[in-house]
């Protein structure tokens, strides 16, 4: 596969269909600029600013545009909010669709067949494997990503963070908490 991609890239480049520098810039952006720190800032802002949170739930694509996210044409981002009654979890059962613009490159397990099937069949078991136990009575909703529609979980703001700055809050937001396979860090441990 790598060789094929390389060959295709060479041919297209030689024919002048694209500028190799543009590809390099894109790869570099995803390797160094884009990552879960962007999603963490989005979540921290939503925790701190009710107006932004409303805008995020209404249209996440639009809401994250101003936060350094590299939106790709045709992509649609949806933010799903965890509540005491509902925990959200994200999967791509078909392949590995992932909200790159806010979370960067996907972890290896996200693309694995066991995660992709078990997230649907046994989400509670998957959470257990990740060390997450939800309060009794919490429903789990699993969202299946596609090439056009991707999801980011808005975790619940941890108790004991009243008055915290957005920057301090963002440090609690883990990548997995935005996929739904984890929870934010314990503020007592982080303080
Ligand atoms: Co996919």
Image (cartoon, rainbow, N blue to C red):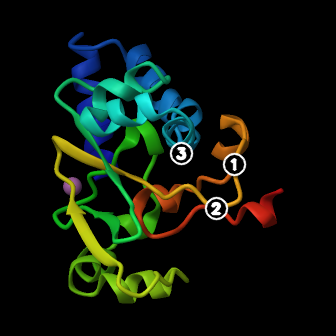
Q: Is mark 1 within 8 Å of ligand 1?
A: no
Instruction: Report the residue marked by disc 1.
Output: 162
Q: Quadrant of residue 66?
A: top left
Marks 1 and 2, Cα distance to the nearest angstrom?
A: 7 Å
Mark 1: secondary structure = loop
Mark 2: secondary structure = loop
- Along the line of sight, the residue nearer the viewer: 20 or 186: 186
Determine whether, in the image, residue 145 is placed left or right of residue 101: left
- Crowd tier of the residue under label 2, counting other residues whose Cα lies within 10 Å: few below 14, some 14–19, many 20 or above: few
Marks 2 and 3, Cα distance to the nearest angstrom?
A: 22 Å
Q: Quadrant of residue 168?
A: top right
Whole-percent x, y for residue 40 in the image? 56, 43
Instruction: Report the residue marked by disc 2.
Output: 159
- Along the line of sight, the residue nearer the viewer: 83 or 43: 83
Q: Quadrant of residue 122?
A: bottom left
Determine whether, in the image, residue 2 is placed left or right of residue 132: left
| Ligand 1 positioned in quadrant | bottom left
Whole-percent x, y for residue 113 in the image? 28, 76
Q: Residue at x 38, y 89 (%)?
A: 125
Instruction: Report the residue marked by disc 3.
Output: 36
Residue 53, disc: none
Q: Nearer the viewer, mark 1 or mark 3?
A: 1
Mark 3: secondary structure = helix
- Along the line of sight, the residue nearer the viewer: 126 or 80: 80
């Amino acid at each position: 596969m790598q060789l094929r991609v390389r060959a295709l890239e060479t041919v297209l480049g030689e024919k002048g269909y694209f500028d190799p520098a543009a590809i390099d810039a894109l790869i570099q952006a995803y390797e160094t600029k884009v990552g879960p720190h962007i999603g963490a800032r989005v979540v921290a802002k939503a925790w701190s600013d009710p107006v932004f949170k409303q805008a995020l739930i209404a249209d996440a694509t639009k809401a994250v545009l101003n936060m350094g996210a590299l939106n790709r044409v045709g992509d649609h981002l949806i933010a799903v909010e965890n509540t005491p009654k509902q925990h959200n979890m994200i999967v791509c059962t078909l392949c590995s669709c992932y909200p790159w613009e806010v979370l960067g490159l996907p972890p290896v397990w996200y693309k694995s067949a066991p995660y992709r099937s078990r997230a649907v069949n046994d989400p509670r078991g998957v959470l257990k494997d990740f060390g997450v136990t939800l309060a009794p009575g919490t429903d789990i909703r699993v969202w299946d990503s596609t090439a056009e529609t991707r999801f980011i979980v808005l975790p619940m703001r941890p108790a004991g963070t009243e008055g915290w700055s957005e920057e301090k809050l963002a440090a609690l937001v883990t990548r997995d908490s935005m996929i739904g396979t984890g929870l934010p860090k314990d503020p007592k441990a982080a303080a």
